[in-house]
Amino acid sequence: MSANDALHIAVLAGDGIGPEVMAPALDVLRRVEATTKLRFRFTDAPAGATHYQQTGRSMPESAIKLCDEADAILLGACGLPHIRYPDNTEIAPQIELRMIFDLYAGVRPARLIPGVPSPIVGAAQHGIDLVLIRESTEGLFASMGKGIVTADEARETMVITRKTSQRLFEFSFRIAERRKARGRKGQLACVDKANVFKAFAYFRGLFDEAAARHPDIEASRIYVDACSAMLVKRPWDFDVLVTENMFGDILSDLTAGLIGGLGMAPSADIGDRHAVFQPCHGTAPDIMGQGKANPTAMILSVALMLDWLADKHLLPEAAAAAERIESAVDKAYADGIKPMEFGGRDGTAEITRAVIAGL
Ligand code: ATP
């Protein structure tokens, strides 16, 4: 593939504020098109709670086929609290896509953008720039829909496999190596509970094997409870962290909180062939339709997508565009953008305008 071939992007805007943050993200990509040789082809597909309400399915077969064929998948947010499956769980095509396409590596960067308030004392001075990698297909989530509940007890079983853990750790060391090449520390911490559970001792053992294959990266091991305390005391001490699905689910909301909120936190769910890029936040029904949604997380997810496409197809133009988007976001905040999300006056339109101006 060359920079002149159009990259085909599947666009699943979803429910709630999903479409409201997707539109700015596509505007950013159109701006990239106008200023580089990169070309994009967007194909929309329905997914989520509204589609379920209309059809009885979380997404049509054609959406899954589109995602399979596209070069990358952009997802807004899916699920609404008042629309549920008969067993009372929410409609979550984003979780289904992880399983369908074996997207085992959930990448959750947390970078504090200068000018954005963090609840952590000293954060503005030290900066926060870490990446949490959450295994996304097994762990405790392997039990999803399979738990056993009787009148007297409930059981859910965690699954850690050699195959997925090995791929997860190789991926994580590669992220640490790429960051080291860009001037970061080059450290990877395995977050687990190996002192209590055999499954986590097994997880850590596989991490140790991978660490031996990557002597260039400083590998460490930390229990999830100690890690949680350190993340709120000295988040700047971390570079890349890798953990099991359920721990990652919780810690990634914590790391999003460190950098100002869910509207600032991008994410990617990556497999060997496919990848979905979406903000960490949900559909935020409390603010939908009011122009208040912060599109920054979705826009930064687009930058993650371009960086992944650059690596996959050897497209330096895409890597450069990803960096330009991040710089434009930084500039918008340095120039004084204050999202309503943290008490400011700026809504979706103002934030989008400021970022596009910076491009
Ligand atoms: P899910 O379970 O789907 O992750 P959730 O109910 O846990 O969703 P969100 O939908 O992400 O959480 O919303 C949590 C809170 O954060 C809400 O008050 C919402 O308004 C706010 N929020 C989330 N995303 C944004 C955003 N992009 N801009 C502004 N506020 C947001």
Image: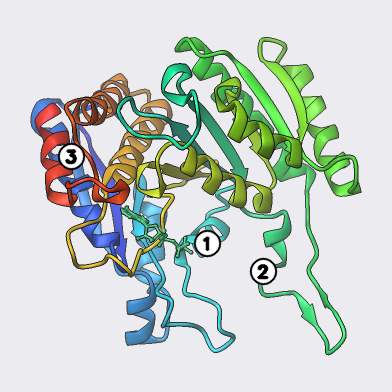
Dot 2 or dot 3: first in sequence order is: 3
Marker disc for residue 144? 2
Q: Which residue is mark 1?
A: 95
Residue at 81% over, 26% down? 208
Residue at the front extreme, as displayed = 121
Q: Are marks 1 and 2 in contact (CB under 8 Å)?
A: yes
Q: Position of residue 91 (x, y in %)?
A: 47, 74
* Place of residue 290 in the rendered image (x, y in percent of width and height, measured from the top left): 18, 65
Residue 163: quadrant of the picture = top right
Give the mark, 3 or 1, whose residue is nearer the N terminus.
3
Q: Is residue 62 visible?
A: yes
Which amino acid, mark 3?
Val
Task: Depth check: give the residue in front, 127 or 9.
Answer: 127
Please report contact status of discs 2 and 3: CB closer than 8 Å, yes or no.
no
Residue 167, x across and y down, in percent: 67, 37
Q: Residue at x 50, y 75 (%)?
A: 90
